Image: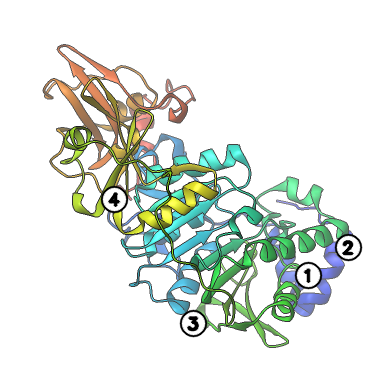
Amino acid sequence: MSIQLPLSFQVRMQTQLEEDYTAFKEALASASPISIRVNANKTSLLTSLTPVPWTETGFYLSERPSFTLDPMFHGGAYYVQEASSMFLEQALKQSVDLEESLAVLDLCGAPGGKSTHIASLLSEGSLLVANEVIKPRANILAENIQKWGSGNVVVTNNDPSHIGVLTGFFDVMVVDAPCSGEGMFRKDPDAIQEWSEANVKLCSERQRRILMDVWDALKPGGVLIYSTCTYNSEENEENLVWLSNQQDVETVPLALQPEWNITETQEQGMRGYRFYPHKTQGEGFFLAVVRKTEGDEAGNYRKSKRPYLVSASKQEKVLVQDWLSESSDWEIVKHKETLRALPKAWMLELEQLYENLRVVYGGIELAEVMKNNAKPLPALALSQHLSADAFPRAEVDLATALKFLHREDVVLEDSANGWVLVQFNGVPLGWGKKLQNRVNNHYPKEWRIRMSLDEALKPENLEKQFVLGNQ
């Protein structure tokens, strides 16, 4: 494919890459690699596929299939994610002890690639706050977090300055900053149209403002992981140098394998890591890690006089107490008619989050309670913490799974009456309620497959459809 690059961008990159520029430009004219990251808590790794070398759970596909028609995708068994950005795994593993109980912020979380990746890497005793400033995108982030199934995540919809008031709250902050998008040129032609020298300057200024807005929320000794999907030094190395001049930080070097072909940079003592498409199998990306060496510690958190999180009654807890594995790890709270499980060890901190931030989703939504009956909710079906024997399960074939996800009527002949967990290849998808000879489909309307299934359900097309685990 041909790609028409802005002239001033070409001049910039020729200066930056010198003799490598021709290979870089040729790489931009080639097809983008397709990669996925597997949820090891829901399915096994794909030994038949080529691994993404800097992560344990990432794999390349030879072509882009219709992910919409794979029930495993809807069940949170994997996430379609750009390979370069999976380098976040190395940044976390090499800069913090992931066995500890950490408070982590993903500041610019939508649509959920990095948030679900972080959630997979953290210990179960940790807490992740996944934030997104744009409300519709925050809702998408919340959907993807629910499908991934981690219970120790809170999704918020806040400006960075709102989060900055939580002094010394976080051990780790991941800031994948909004940028000029140069690294996405071959995936997103609109990014080329929107690029300009002025926009690069605007993005750099905005990135600095974002960093300052949230800086106080990072603990002394805490780690900031900063990344962009752009090539220019203004949004990358120069911002790190600027940060080091404003705050007390030290750079955190990362060990690289030579075969990764990642380009290490260093400017005024600040290290960074660049991904170029002519060297690595992925899009353009930049990442750096710094440690905060000075600053204010968090205060002691106390229970609010008017708590935002109200415990469910004993009778309500009885309705759902057998639904979660390790039920003693969870605090069951009630808001309106919804019962929710939150990590018991973090309740004082969660109270601060709910009091200071706009929380879109948190913990595990368990059930709606009506007249002493509990209706299980979609997030519970997809949760990694659902007890294996809490509900009967119905294993369905590909055609039935797609119909279920399309929110059509399905037949579950061997199931008893009541709530049934519909699953495909052992991965839960959602709830059906069997009433004698019919099944009510309780898959969420807003999550349903919207495309027509007429062609997909033809036997010859079902045989060819990409399904994770069949590779």
Query: Which of the 4 quarters of the picture holds residue 75?
Result: top left
Which one is nearer the viewer's eye here, 418 or 153?
Answer: 153
Q: Earlier in the sequence, mark 4 or mark 2?
A: 2
Are dots 4 and 2 in contact, CB under 8 Å? no
Tag 1 residue? 234
Q: Is residue 149 above or below residue 405?
A: below
Residue sitting at the far bottom = 269
Are dots 1 and 2 in contact, CB under 8 Å? no
- Whether residue 36 is visible to the viewer of this picture, yes or no, is no
Display colour scheme: rainbow
How packed is label 1: few (under 14 Cα within 10 Å), some, or many (20 or more)?
A: some
Residue drawn at (73%, 72%) of the image: 239
Q: Earlier in the sequence, mark 1 or mark 4?
A: 4
Tag 4 residue? 42
Mark 3 secondary-structure assignment: loop
Q: Amino acid at mark 1?
A: Glu
Mark 4 secondary-structure assignment: loop
Are dots 3 and 1 in contact, CB under 8 Å? no
Tag 2 residue? 8
Q: CA distance from mark 4 to mark 2?
A: 47 Å
Which one is nearer the viewer's eye here, 417 or 101?
Answer: 101
Tag 3 residue? 257
